[in-house]
Amino acid sequence: MTEKEGSLTLPERTQEIAGKTFMGFIHDRNSQGNTYFSDRKEYLWLFKTHSSMKIDVIVGLQWGDEGKGKIVDYLATQYDMVCRFQGGPNAGHTLKFDGKKFVLHTIPSGIFRADLQNLIGNGVVIDPITLEKEIAELQSTGLSFLDRLFVAHKAHLILPTHRLLDAASEASKGAAKIGSTLRGIGPTYMDKTGRNGLRVGDVFAPDFMDKYQTLKEKHLNLASMYPAIDFNLEAEETKWFASLECLRSLQHVDGEYFVNQALDAGKRLLAEGAQGSMLDIDFGTYPYVTSSNTITAGLCTGLGVAPKRVGKVIGITKAYCTRVGSGPFPSELHDEEGEALRAAGHEFGATTGRPRRCGWIDLPQLKYTIMLNGVDEIAITKVDVLNSFASLKAATHYQIDGKETDAIPFEMVEGMPMSYREFSGWMEDTASCQQREQLPAALQDYLLFLEKTLATPIKYISTGPERQALIIS
Ligand code: IMP
């Protein structure tokens, strides 16, 4: 009988162990030993039990910036590998510990946990310049991680001219601009689906320079359709080619085999979403969205994992709501309460530094994204930001044609009227609370109302930016 670690093996011959005859064995992923079976029925039962290793996922339920980095970093201790599956350096996952702040753009948030593997999956778009900078910054902290960082061959590359096109396209749109992070995300995904893109694996090909030049020429032709913008292409190309050395030196894998073999071997995997579900290319507030599938389904194409292997889905929301960039945001506050949320929550973009738009939590919007993602558990972040509010609100319905509805309309529009429910604030510090029962009563009421309305349990309550400010309920 042949055995490949972690795989199921049908018998080539029967085995005799302790006087009993067995047909074969199945590798037991939990005990890392073998479970022997004596007939086909037993084998089928064992197969069903043992092929059930699944990948869990964390997704943002709003317009991004929900605090995924902190929750991934916390949960990472329960996993063997964290995988990014979409987006690129438009993301900014912030983690705070030991009094220091770290912002990750491309590298998964599991990187700070020793022994944990981290994969940049095929669905991610990579700017080698940003990646090299991120690696250097992490290395300067003394963290050792290069032996734990893997890059999928099939991930697409962001070229300097993708950033040029992003900037030119946005500038040409005037007031109708998307509010892009200008990291070249849209043009790179356009080349991916247009079948013109360059992938990580291409950097080793002998004709790489020819491919690069062809794509660059195409981009320059396209850019000539837009009004000229200030962009030093030569300088950016010099940096880009220099950074390819770093990219080439990393560990490259066939991401789809890497992930599936890890699952077969019984490893526990967590997929880390970037951006939020309302920025999803298909189901977000189109066209004010990003260019990838940010919802749970995106992990299947972004990592090469079959849908039946998707396990627990953790959805993250802030206790209020923010959005950065253009596009509708019905529960946005344009008054001093919005200003107070921005100030208390330090609501400035982790990637661009832009002030985030702030407003109340939007329950129809959350019901929609909970449905799209199949959320099992909610993580709610930044509840401490509301500590100094005498009262707060939650948007319960949209008002369309004079009627209340909680269905997301085809086109969400700026300033859509909403119905709200008001809650008393708690006006208390939550820093010392270690359990849900210790939280102020008014906050417990608010959480319970959210759970009931969203019909989903709140499992994690984040009461501050630091690692330990997290209640598991
Ligand atoms: P792009 O993905 O950079 O093209 O930006 C498209 C839209 O998504 C803009 O409104 C951005 O502000 C927004 N966006 C992109 N990435 C993030 C993120 O990580 N957090 C929040 N908003 C984002």
Image: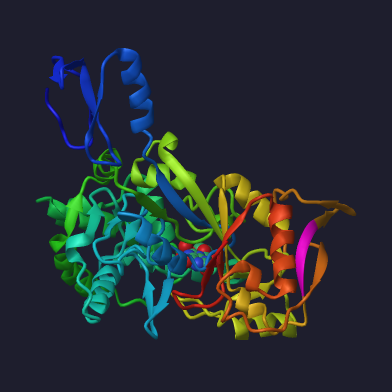
Q: Residue at x 23, y 69 (%)?
A: 240
Q: Is residue 10 above or below residue 319?
A: above
In this view, the residue in front, 21 or 312, is 21
In this rendering, the answer to whether 189 lies above or below 334 is above
Q: Reply above or below: 45 against 137.
A: above
Q: Provide residue 455's location: percent of width, then percent of height.
A: 69, 49
Q: Nearer the viewer, residue 170 or 331?
A: 331
Residue 434 falls left or right of residue 438? left
The stretch of residues the image draws in magenta is 392-397
125 is within the stretch colored magenta: no
Q: Residue at x 51, y 70 (%)?
A: 470
- Establish if 93 lies above or below 256: below
Residue 394 drawn in magenta? yes
**Quadrant location, the N terminus:** top left
134 with respect to 63 (left or right)? left
Quarter of the figure that contains the C terminus: bottom right
Looking at the image, how many numbered discs can be counted on the residues? 0
